[in-house]
Image: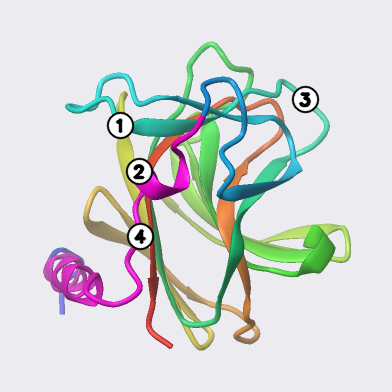
Amino acid sequence: MSVAVRGLVLAASFAAAGCVGWSISREFFAGTPGQPPASIEVVSGRWEVARAEGLADEMPALAQASHDAASASLCVLAGTRVEDGALQVRLRTRREAPSMGGGVAWGVASGAMRYRVAELDAAAGCIRVREVAGGIDREIASAAIGGADGWRTLRVDFSGDDVTCQLDGVVVLETELDEAVEGGVGLYCPPASTSLFADFAVVTRR
């Protein structure tokens, strides 16, 4: 099956899976502008409610506002743990930031000593899958992508040790991890990146 055709099939399956365990940003990110929403737990960085400027209905968004050049930023959905499922988010990187990236995290262990990341690196023009464990950050796989400004839609499916990443509805990366793990899910920004997120969706298949 071609990448383009598989992308369409996965998009259809995501819509169908949305009937079970589907949540979106209007639940996650609503709150007082400039403050973190009650639905998330801040692990690192400064996360605050904003507006999704440029999207049709100006839905609630989540901004990563820290300019820390030394540490990544991570937040998780309160009380949510997933082993087998999918995450999807719309994100917009900011050109004025020193770094231009952001993505989704899953398998987040207590204390964030372990987690997996699917990250859009707009400056480098690639999608990366990475694993952080015991303070060691290692890249699992990466794939080049076409450049585009504005909002992009990033999605990752994880089932067992298989991981599939889509960007704007097209499969761009398929890889494997050492093992499946249950853990928290959330959003991630690399050091010195201040990105904007909206329409965060979680699909739990198990």
Q: Position of residue 146 (x, y in %)?
A: 30, 38
**Residue 26's disc number:** 2
The residue stretch that appears in magenta: 5-31
Which amino acid type is marked by label 2?
Answer: Arg
Residue placed most toward the observer, 132 or 65 = 65
Q: Which label's residue is closer to the chain start, 3 or 1?
A: 1
Quarter of the image that includes the N terminus: bottom left
Give the labeled residue for mark 1.
59
Residue placed most toward the observer, 74 or 140 = 74
Q: Position of residue 85 (x, y in %)?
A: 42, 76
Q: Which label's residue is closer to the chain start, 2 or 3?
A: 2
**Between marks 3 and 1, how big is the CA–CA gap?**
27 Å
The local secondary structure at tag 3 comes to loop
Give the labeled residue for mark 4.
23
Whether pointer 1 and pointer 2 mark residues with C-beta atoms closer than 8 Å, the reply is yes
Question: Quarter-wise, where is residue 135 in the image?
Answer: bottom right
**Between marks 2 and 4, how big is the CA–CA gap?**
8 Å
Task: Check residue 23 for magenta coloring.
Answer: yes
**Between marks 4 and 1, how big is the CA–CA gap?**
14 Å
The crowding category of the residue bearing disc 2, from other C-alpha atoms within 10 Å (few below 14, some 14 to 19, many at least 20), is: some
**Between marks 2 and 3, how big is the CA–CA gap?**
28 Å
Whether pointer 3 and pointer 1 mark residues with C-beta atoms closer than 8 Å, the reply is no
Which amino acid type is marked by label 4?
Answer: Ser
Q: Which label's residue is closer to the chain start, 4 or 3?
A: 4
Which amino acid type is marked by label 1?
Answer: Met
Give the labeled residue for mark 3.
68
Which residue is outermost to the right? 134
Instruction: From the image, state whether disc 3 or disc 1 is nearer to you.
Output: 1
Whether pointer 2 and pointer 3 mark residues with C-beta atoms closer than 8 Å, the reply is no
The crowding category of the residue bearing disc 4, from other C-alpha atoms within 10 Å (few below 14, some 14 to 19, many at least 20), is: some
